[in-house]
Image (spheres, rainbow, N blue to C red):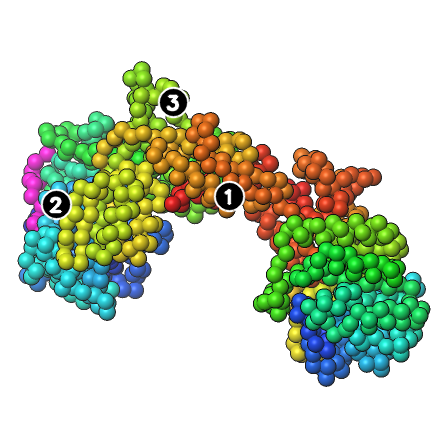
Amino acid sequence: MKNSDQSLPGLYIHVPFCKSKCPYCDFYSITSLSLIPAWLSGIKKEVLIYKDRFGYFDSLYLGGGTPTIISEPDLIHLVDYLFTHFYFSPDSEISIEANPDDITQEKLKLLRNLGINRISLGAQSFNDYDLLYLSRRHTVLQTRRVIEMIRSAGFTNLGIDLMYGLNGQTETDWCKTLESAVDYKPEHISCYQLTIKKGTPFKQKKFKPLNESKERSLFMSTSALLEQAGYLHYEVSNFAREEKYICRHNAKYWNHTPYLGLGPSAHSFSPNQRWWNVKSLNKYCELLQKNRPPRAGTESLTEEQLQLEYLCLGLRTSAGIDRRFLNNLSALKELTDAKLVSIKGGRVVPTREGFLFADSIPLLLSE
Amino acid sequence: MEPINDQTIIRNFSIIAHIDHGKSTLADRLLELTGAVSAREMTPQYLDKMDLERERGITIKAQTVSLAYQALDGKTYRLNLIDTPGHMDFSYEVSRSLAACEGALLVVDATQGIEAQTLANLDLALENKLKIIPVINKIDLPQADPQRVKEEIELLLGVDSAEIMEVSAKSGTNVHIVLEAIVKRIPAPSGKKDNPLSALIFDSWYDTYQGVIVLIRVFEGKIFPGMRIKLFASNNEYEVNRVGIFSPAAKDTEGLSTGEVGFIIAGIKNLRDIQVGDTITDACQPTIKPFPGFQELKPMVFCGVYPSFPEQYNPLREALEKLRLNDSSFTFEPENSVALGFGFHCGFLGLLHKEIIQERLEREFNLDLVSTAPNVVYTVTTLKGDIVKIESPDQLPPPQEIAHIAEPYILASIPTPVKYLGEILKLCEEKRGMQRDLKYLSPEKVVLKYEIPLNEVVWDFNDRLKSLSRGYASFDYEFLDFRNSSMVKLDLLLNGSKIDALSLLVPKEKAYYIGKGLVEKIRKIIPRHLFEVVIQAAIGSKVIARDSIPPLRKNVTAKCYGGDITRKRKLLEKQKEGKKRMKQVGKISIPQEAFLSILKVS
């Protein structure tokens, strides 16, 4: 991964609309599609707030929600507007999140024409029972068709997002899903263990948490299977077929590279500052109407806080952290003895098992 | 101001009551009615100077205030209200305040009736031969049942119900009648002002600007600025600089005469040069008969007090020294624990005393403290015949040298509604108690007296008593004596290493049960580590209970993008803070809570 000082910032656009809400998702999204125009004019106003502070990006990520829900003219308008007001380096990574149920040939063509060069597909599983359990609107067959469509539309950078640790899913089932994904040789695979978030329908019922041994075993098998298939396990939940397919935009979150997030609930980071927008489209539009930044909060990070973040973010990635950064050598020794981290080329990097303790290790290494 | 020539207009009295029965509110009203403090200046519980006293609603240091009251007979009386602490941990301070009075208002809550401290304080007042004026307070409350409380008091004191006053200190109802009763029923002080000076020291404190301030009651003769005085106990002589009264602000007078109560300042530098209960007399013309003095109370409850952060060791020592200036009843000595580092072994009169000192250390001195479970003082007789006082389990000589161990016993008095009697009897039996008395105050209320080892009480006795009686039973105690019992030292081991701060002396027959409970409790408090943590309770080398905390198998958040970073860092910051407050023993992090958990094994 690149160092923060060499990288350009990334731009994130939050598209808070979905046809229906998935019961495990806690990202901000609403189903009143009639509000899309209001949102779009909000984004345009917000762009103007930051266009002088953030001039040059090398990644754009359209996330959500469901960005592909936006109508053709609106999408064209949005992307044109962004490209008019911000500069993007010629080799920029331009990603969009897509769901198998709202991808069409025409839409893919449009995305290509807009300059989008990476698709992150919310496939979730290659098992129809799992899709039913997750209340997804698509079937495995649809996913398979859409992947072929994406390829034939000329996209050479495809990410497939999967979820595991579902109730009723055996380890064998999960490995089959993984193998199905690998068969398509996607450039990127994200494997998220299902986490129950506050305020989601899954929290209220339905989901029975797995025991730790089961979770552990699923994680270890995932990593082993994908590495066997030639993928790099470069972040706790992320795998890339080659180093160049590491998601450039997401990597910025973990490398302390600046990023600007636009849209309700979007988060931003610009050296030593974090801010986040209000989690309500109404509020968002209202504030912009009054020419005020639609923020819900900001924080300035102290050197100590930056270091703590460096520790906890770095240890989630295979790049690890600079060894010179650590003073607690007895803790480091304990962790290397326990084979949770290793020291490679002056860096402390987590082992596969170390990824499993990414929330414990920073605390142990801090003083 | 001149000293009072006419003794017949002086009344010296205290107010005694169970905690929360309204003693301080009644004092507030008396101050207000006599014009000592205007309603505008009045803050609730005016006499409770320390924040802590006001917040907890209890009086820790005795205070005194002189009131001018014009009675119905047209004469203006000088009423000296000598405040007393309400809790028996401070019975020493109560008894010395009472020794300065001729009478006492016995305040009883109309909704609660007689409680443990009502009885204990009443006993002290009767020992001092005080005239008791019973006052039922809080009659304005809807749940008030003054008739029932009257019956309890009649039975207890053998007084006529007409003598019992019903007031509401809060609203002021009938409080003026109390003032008349003080004048009419409490005798004026006796003693001759022409005799040589004889004054009782009943309190003293250290003031940064004035030095030691001494509260006295003049029994014979007079005292005035410029006089040379002698203290009987130390035989030291001083010259009196200032004499005065509190009304309630300090006010200098030309002197204090027989029967009066007030303060003197006499260039005494160190609080230790003064002994409460001592007699002050005229250096040139000493009295022949000093007061018997008070017996000095020794600390009965001990615990280790450690700074959470090592750099607070010196500030802690300075704070302890400062507190000791005004409280000679607690002790401290440096000690060193493998688990907790450098700290102090402190001795207290009782549990409340311990809590108050600890709270003052944390609040007034901004210290972050860990304190170990309290234990009591034991006397060990060795085979050689030596008697050793043991203030903490690690001072225990090797078992082969011990002839026997004696532990302190207390006499607990527990007034309770009859319906909780069965449960309370069970609790007292479980706590190795022996019943000494059971007396009905009324058909619904009973007073239980039990002899119980103090050791059983410092654990969780009060909490359990309160919970099984829904707060209706109360508890107070006095020290009895030391009795032989079969105690063993129970050690706690984590992955094989002994945690000294968690050792306990326990009765042999309960060791297994306590060991098991302790292991269970610790298991819940210590967080999971990356390795297994084995917890054992052992007597000597014999393990009597064991459990383990399984290692963490996984601890990772699946997603970590934009918004989750702030949340994650905040969580980590919180955990880091928490880690700082944990004690590291080897590789194991032990939360501070663990060092107190022993209290709640049940």
| Residue labelled with disc 1 | B523
Q: Position of residue B93 (x, y in %)?
A: 24, 42
Residue drawn at the location 70% of the way across and 50% of the way down: A217
Q: Secondary structure at mark 1?
A: helix
> How far apart in space, not on screen, are marks 3 and 1 (Cα)?
29 Å
Q: Position of residue B48 (x, y in %)?
A: 30, 52
Q: Do pointers 1 and 2 mark residues of a single chain?
A: yes
**Closer to the eye: label 1 or 2:** 1
Residue drawn at the location 81% of the way across and 81% of the way down: A71
Mark 3 belongs to which subunit? B
- Residue B399: numbered disc: 3
Where, by quadrant of the figure, is residue B388 drawn? Answer: top left
Mark 1 belongs to which subunit? B
B454 drawn magenta: no
Q: Which residues are magenta?
A: B186-196
Q: Are marks 1 and 2 in contact (CB under 8 Å)?
A: no
**Is residue B256 visible from the viewing direction of this image?**
no
Q: Position of residue A150 (x, y in %)?
A: 89, 70
Q: Secondary structure at mark 3?
A: helix
**If you read the primary sequence from the N terminus, does the residue marked by circle 1 or circle 2 appear first?**
2
**If you read the primary sequence from the N terminus, does the residue marked by circle 2 or circle 3 appear first?**
2
> How far apart in space, not on screen, are marks 1 and 2 (Cα)?
51 Å
Q: Position of residue A309 (x, y in %)?
A: 70, 51
> How far apart in space, not on screen, are marks 2 and 3 (Cα)?
46 Å
